[in-house]
Amino acid sequence: MRLDNEQESQNIEDRRGSRGTKAVVGGGIGSIALVLIAMFFGIDPSAILQGDGGFQSSVQEQAPQSQQPGVRDQGREFVSRVLGSNERVWGEIFQKAGRQYAEPKLVLFTGQVQSACGFASAASGPFYCGSDQKVYIDLAFYSELRERFKAPGDFAQAYVIAHEVGHHVQNLLGIMGKVQARQQRASERDANALSVRLELQADCLAGIWASLANRDRKILEHGDIEEGLNAAAMIGDDTLQKRSQGHVVPEGFTHGSAEQRVRWFRKGLETGDLKQCDTFAGRGVL
Ligand SMILES: [Zn+2]
């Protein structure tokens, strides 16, 4: 990937090296309160506390790294340029539609973090919290992605950020709220099916970002597209289920199969057309 033509974002919140606020809120009490708040607002609390399941990580709470908050480093610069690129692309798309794009913040953390959606450990993987409009990521996840999920490459890493920004776009457009309201009234099976549609749309939106960023700033290099598609396949629900339990239970899918994730990411990537990302159209097979 070439990101040197993209501006760094000003929306990075660097909380690395801090131990989160768990001690301050008094152990589990804070998270229980947040679960109750989540239930009040009709968000599935298990979904919140598990983070973005498709990216579930085995990163455990670690000692803070030697980096001090605010200190520049490669990982931060990479994430910052990917986020900056997303801001530029989505800012233009929203502007053309006569709307304002409210930029999300991106929180870098190590080990554990407090969000408006609850307390999360790095084991949840990167996630987006709609209540505070922030994307959360522990950069240790990138070595997980490379080694455990067998999805190496900088474009795979950028796809992770773009997918979470995709959730932010869904939030701004009111799609996330509508889906969560419907999930509340649905059976577990139907709620999972709605989650799959939401997640595949975030994949498609990530593809839209890559398509338009490449059109304007030539970000893609040889092999990048394959890296991104490979990452989408490696975090497909069937791939993950096979690894963890040896068999596949489609009813339990919350993010989509490898084939679906690849197909929707590719759709956004190849067309750059938002209209192609309507994963909620029709009731049939996605
Ligand atoms: Zn997601």
Image (cartoon, helix red, strand yellow):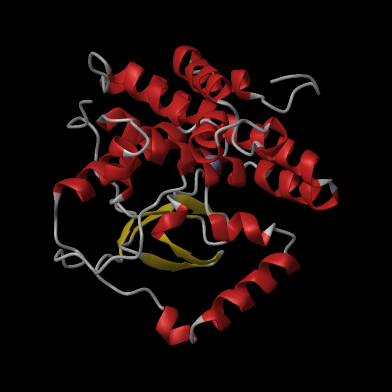
Q: Position of residue 109 (x, y in %)?
A: 33, 61
Q: Quadrant of residue 106?
A: bottom left
What residue is rendered at 69% in x and 58% in y? Answer: 43
Q: Position of residue 69 (x, y in %)?
A: 21, 66
- Name the image quarter holding the N terminus: top left
Q: Is residue 97 visible?
A: no
Side of 270 where 284 appears, left or right = right
Q: Position of residue 8 (x, y in %)?
A: 24, 44
- Name the image quarter holding the C terminus: top right
- Residue at the far front: name it: 246
Whether 250 is drawn above or below 184: the answer is above
Give the camera-side residue of 177 and 163. Answer: 163
Side of 50 where 234 appears, left or right = left
Whether 56 is drawn above or below 16: the answer is above
Tag count: 0
Side of 189 where 166 appears, left or right = left
Q: Quadrant of residue 162?
A: top left
Give the camera-side residue of 173 and 265. Answer: 265
What residue is rendered at 30% in x and 28% in y? Answer: 155
Q: Is residue 165 visible?
A: yes
Give the camera-side residue of 167 and 48. Answer: 48
What residue is rendered at 75% in x and 68% in y? Answer: 40
Q: Position of residue 112 (x, y in %)?
A: 39, 66
Side of 54 where 5 appears, left or right = left
